[in-house]
Image (cartoon, helix red, strand yellow):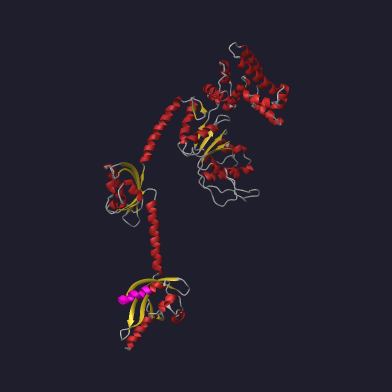
Amino acid sequence: MTDDLELYHQLFQHAPIGIIRTTLGGRLLDVNPALAQMLGYRSVEENITAIKNIVSELYVDPLHREKLLRITAEKDRLLNFESQFYRKDGSIMDCRIHVRIARGQDGGVSYLEGFVEDISQQKRTSKALEDSEIRYRSVFENTGSATIIIEADMTISLANTGFVKMTGYSKKEIEGKMKWPAIIARTEDLERMMAYHFNRRKFEENVPIEYEFILMDRQGVKKNVFARVDMIAGTQRSVASILDVSFLKKKGALLQKENLRLRSALKDSCRLGNIIGKSLSMQQVYEMILRASATDANVIIYGKSGTGKELVARAIHDMSDRRDRRLVPVNCGAIPRELMESEFFGYRKGGFTGAVHDKPGFFDLAAGGTLFLDELGELTEQIQVKLLRVLEGGGYTPIGGVEPCQPDVRIVAATNHNLSDLVRSGRMREDFFYRIHIIPIYMPPLCERKDDIPLLVDYFLHKYDPSRSIVLSKGELDMLKAHDWPGNVRELENTLQRYVSLNALAFAGDSYGAVKASTKKLVHDLNAPTLHLREAVRRFEKSYITESLRRHGWNRTKTASALGLGRKTLYLKMKQLGITPQPDAVLEITRSGHF
């Protein structure tokens, strides 16, 4: 008997599992070293001394103790009861308890004896796996495409909501029952898919396969789909992501038809947007605009000053997918060098002295749209480096900012320089040049497309004389065609605006000739028998006031005094007659400081 007691004592002391003895009322009688250590005590004595009543001091939830007693009393023992104990430091230990009732010789209950396992790590692992499963299930269910898991025998073992919607079958009909080939409509697609699918299993490397096929849903509707199939490492399973591309096929067909229609229409078209012309060189420009608007690649527009480079940039933007966002034009030559970085990339409040609020840069303003960089050749090498980083996907950081910005901006640039010459002379970085020079468009000067002059004349005359009361004679039109137009379309527009205002044709720098011709034309008009009196008076009044304004340097105060009119009356007559200062007059007004 003594030997049995000694053996039991040795087992109690050295058992790797925790052992506890308590009274029915919850008084702690004994614990073994293993349990004391689990609970964070240095010895059994410290453990027993610290815990007077296990119900209030050991159990995290005292109701667990009541439940344990109730079940144990019914069954005489309790196995695999899970609860939580407080450790010495206040932390919580998840545990599994096995309890038996120890009875005396009279059959009465002497004490409760329990075996305690620390399952905290198991709980944490189980919780982590559960959380991981929930996360992966959420990703699987909410991925943008229909996704399935395919077993080695081609059975679909798992299908997400996207696949259910795409096929029209329920999860119960799919998972574990449906074969992957069952939804493939055409035999040739099935043969190609099977060849791909089984062929790749012969390779050790995990290389995904991609293919298109026709899928037939539950209602018999056929859909063009694109599938990507990946092997799951270490298994014979595959995961397939399927994308319905039917709408893309339809959209592609419609776009192709629309593209053909536009190209056909352009052969006889005399304009694209606000760009006027039907010469062969302009037809080539229209073709390049169409191509550029279909992509997001950077564009560089070459052309002399006044050829309409900004109109080309706007046409590309208006015909692209970015048409609903902003086109932000930037004259690079007008930005002071020391302000270029802040203008392009903006700054944050407190970024430097005087930065009292955040200021968005050009890239912020053009987010999702197009940034038009006019006079690109005027950019400094320092800003070229920073722009290059943006173009290469590195983004930028506003002055005083800490978070980098990744702009979604399309770049369309323009220049009247030969950028290759700038690279050779060292004024432009070669790497920056190659990032900008993706789609080049060359705008021809007006002297190379004189066949377009009659169209441009008609457009500008209607713009400045909506009533169309002024018509150019054949001789005047011949004069326009014979001119070299160094200022290109801009010079032609200014010339026609001056013609409408002065009733005389005069080129830049020929203002005296214009006034002289105007007087001669006016006399001719007044002698014309078909001219109505009201129109004759109007023309005379307009010519007379315009000549008086010119003589007085377009100073309205002096002109009004000379004509015996009030300054406000003169202003109203100028507005009524459509009299506006010409470019040389504006320069004179600016110098004099008054109008």
What secondary structure is the magenta-colored segment mainly? helix
Residue 557 appears in view = yes
Residue 155 appears in view = no
- Residue 507 spot, x, y in % from top left: 62, 22
Apparent side of residue 332 relative to residue 184 in the rendered image (left or right): right
| Residue projecting furthest to the bottom | 2
- Residue 299 spot, x, y in % from top left: 51, 37
- Residue 124 spot, x, y in % from top left: 41, 66
Name above or below for residue 21 compared with residue 564: below
Q: Nearer the viewer, residue 328 or 20?
A: 20
Q: Is residue 27 magenta?
A: no
The N terminus - image quarter = bottom left
The C terminus - image quarter = top right
Name above or below for residue 252 compared with residue 76: above
Q: Nearer the viewer, residue 553 or 228?
A: 553
What residue do we see at 31% from left, 77% from top?
76
Q: Nearer the viewer, residue 115 or 440?
A: 115
Q: Quadrant of residue 589?
A: top right
What residue do we see at 43% from left, 72% from top?
60
Residue range in magenta is 66-77
What residue do we see at 45% from left, 74% from top?
87
Q: Quadrant of residue 581?
A: top right
Q: Is residue 68 magenta?
A: yes
Q: How many marks?
A: 0
- Residue 502 spot, x, y in % from top left: 63, 21
Apparent side of residue 283 relative to residue 173 in the rendered image (left or right): right
